[in-house]
């Protein structure tokens, strides 16, 4: 007896898929690869997803249909291949999709007041009426909980669509998250690079940041896996580098700038911030004492042809505010409050210039 494809398909039309009740031919489950070699018949069954619970039983039903309606001499046993449709890749929502501008605050070395600048910049931007988020990405030395008086805060999950996301804490008009909210503040964070990077990604992608005008990221000092994770996870609008005026800090500031501006990272530098620019006693607000040198950041900014966004003086209230959970930028009338307000306005201006003159920053792609 001669076999031919239509005879095979007619036989298979008697087999119904239990999941829908439709026959396998009309359902498009029989691949267009029916082959006949003498009495040997072979073809493939196509299933929507891997590990379909009806796959084995359906193969047996198809074998029996061939033997019943085509002929007992048909060689079909073991000749039906099971295939699965390629799973459509899940459309991943762009991280921080509702955020207009992402600003990385960095420093070449520790101890220059980077976190103080980042926290007060966030508050100063909020004072200007902008929607602001602050991410404490200094995984191994988180300071935002202390600086905002939120050491006992423990963020909770909230339903957002089909997901449950971390709800950021909010204070002084700033939404914020820090790894410090999730670890014991009395113990050191002893994590390998991969664990720290994954924790940072969660704070970015698994949190309900919502719509923000500015998302300020307080990066760890120096250069590390955290910096790489950041530029690989989101497209950073621009970076701010914080330094003191002294030469040893400026050397490290140059290295931090070169990291962002290198060909592989290519993040624009919005400008420099000179912290601890001078000491001003509260009782002598007109006096300036240059404890760490004078205008070192100003000279570096001129040398690198980047803006000097602000000069922040040393006053006792900065330290007290950080320790008491009340950033000095909350008091817009104080010397430092005015300095941070000016910094915020300059940052807004430079972001606008950057966005009007340069294309959107691209995430750093990892090629394996």
Image: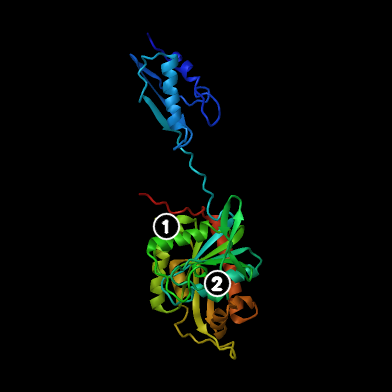
Q: Which of the labelled discs sits on residue 265, or is there none? A: 1
Secondary structure beneath dot 2 equals helix
Examine the rendered structure and indicate whether residue 185 appears above or below residue 224: below
Q: Is residue 2 above or below residue 126?
A: above
Residues marked 2 and 1 touching at CB (< 8 Å) = no
Q: Which of 222/151 is in front?
A: 151
For marks 2 and 1, give the one nearer the viewer: 2
Q: Earlier in the sequence, mark 2 or mark 1?
A: 2
How many residues crowd around disc 2 within 10 Å: few (fewer than 14), some, or many (20 or more)?
A: many
Q: Secondary structure at mark 1?
A: loop
Q: Can residue 115 be seen?
A: yes
- Residue sitting at x 34%, y 15%: 39
- The disc label shown at residue 119, or none: 2
Residue 319, position in %: x, y? 53, 82
Image quarter in which the N terminus is found? top left
Query: Which residue is drawn at the image coordinates 40% and 59% (left, top)?
Result: 262
């Amino acid at each position: 007896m001669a076999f031919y494809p239509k005879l095979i398909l007619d036989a298979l039309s008697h087999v119904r898929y239990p999941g829908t009740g439709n026959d396998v031919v009309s359902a498009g489950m029989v691949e267009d690869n029916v082959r006949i070699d003498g009495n040997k018949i072979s073809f493939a069954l196509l299933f929507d997803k891997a590990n379909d619970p009806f796959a084995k039983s359906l193969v047996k039903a198809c074998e029996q249909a061939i033997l019943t309606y085509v002929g007992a001499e048909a060689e079909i046993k073991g000749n039906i291949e099971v295939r699965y449709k390629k799973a459509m890749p899940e459309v991943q929502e762009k991280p921080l999709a509702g955020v207009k501008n992402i600003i990385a605050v960095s420093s070449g070395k520790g101890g220059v007041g980077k976190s103080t600048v980042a926290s007060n910049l966030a508050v100063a931007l909020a004072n200007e009426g902008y929607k602001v988020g602050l991410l404490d990405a200094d995984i191994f030395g988180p300071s935002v909980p202390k600086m905002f008086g939120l050491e006992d805060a423990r963020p909770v999950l909230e339903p957002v669509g089909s997901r449950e996301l971390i709800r950021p804490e909010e204070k002084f008009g700033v939404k914020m998250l820090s790894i410090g909210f999730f670890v014991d503040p009395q113990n050191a964070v002893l994590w390998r690079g991969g664990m720290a990077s994954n924790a940072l990604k969660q704070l970015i992608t698994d949190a309900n940041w919502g719509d923000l005008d500015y998302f300020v990221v307080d990066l760890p000092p120096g250069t590390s896996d955290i910096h790489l994770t950041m530029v690989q996870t989101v497209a950073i609008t621009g970076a701010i580098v914080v330094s003191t005026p002294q030469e040893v800090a400026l050397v490290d500031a140059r290295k931090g700038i070169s990291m962002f501006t290198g060909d592989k990272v290519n993040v624009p530098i919005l400008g420099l911030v000179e912290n601890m620019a001078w000491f001003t006693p509260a009782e002598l607000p007109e006096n300036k004492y240059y404890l760490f040198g004078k205008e070192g950041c100003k000279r570096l900014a001129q040398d690198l042809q980047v803006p000097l966004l602000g000069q922040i003086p040393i006053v006792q209230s900065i330290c007290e505010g950080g320790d008491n959970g009340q950033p000095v930028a909350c008091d817009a009338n104080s010397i430092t409050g005015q300095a941070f307000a000016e910094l915020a306005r300059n940052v807004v201006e430079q972001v606008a210039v950057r966005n009007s003159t340069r294309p959107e920053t691209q995430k750093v792609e990892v090629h394996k």
